[in-house]
Amino acid sequence: MNRKTAWASLIILLSGLMLSTAHAARLSTALQVELQTAMLTYNDSILSDGSYLYLDTRTDTMRVIYPANAHPFIVSLGEHYFVCSEFIDDNGDSITADYLVRKIQGKYKVVQMIIDDRESLSKAMKKAGR
């Protein structure tokens, strides 16, 4: 994702913040923007020619995926946050991407990207009482 695409996505995302869930609405708009910006900056740093290559550990294959959209949905876990996004593959199938974001030296940064494993994220959140 080039910078123009990233910022265009952020603008679209900001317009969708008002439609976010009640939980995410408890976060200030400024914090939501910071978290989404951290995700977009991270994506910008890992994409090559607009795509992302990763090892799918469920199928033991390498897969290429492309950013599709960012969701205004953010889940907090104490001082840490999960920010959601969506990618698509060459067949147009949707793949979720969840980013663990935390504050490091005063700035929010992605510390882990979880691809296509919403089930594990849900289980971890339940164990944490969320």
Image (cartoon, grey):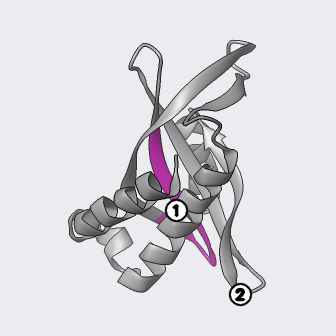
Image x and y of residue 8, in percent: 35, 59
- Identify the secondary structure beneath mark 2: loop
Mark 1 or mark 2: whose residue is earlier in sequence: 2
| Side of 61 relative to 14 (left or right) | right
Query: What range of the chain is rendered magenta?
Result: 75-86
Identity of the residue drawn at 60% across and 23% down: 64
Residue 20 in sight in this render: no
**Residue 11 image offset from top left, x and y in percent:** 32, 65
Of the pair 49 and 18, the residue shown nearer to us: 49
How far is disc 1 from disc 2 in space, using C-alphas? 25 Å
- Helix, strand or loop status at disc 1: loop
Say if the magenta span includes residue 84: yes
Q: Image point 63% across, 78% down: which residue? A: 79
Residue 91's quadrant in the figure? top left
**Residue at label 1?**
130
Q: Few, some or many C-alpha atoms within 10 Å of disc 1 (few <14, some 14-19, many ≥20)? A: few
Q: Which mark is residue 50?
A: none
Q: Are marks 1 and 2 in contact (CB under 8 Å)?
A: no
Query: Vertically, is 21 above or below 50?
Result: below
In the rendered image of this protein, does residue 16 appear above or below residue 126? below
Residue 96 visible (yes or no): yes
Q: Nearer the viewer, residue 97 or 49?
A: 49
| Residue 76 relative to residue 71: left or right | right
Viewer-proximal residue, 119 or 58? 58
Closer to us: mark 1 or mark 2?
2
**Disc on res. 106:** 2
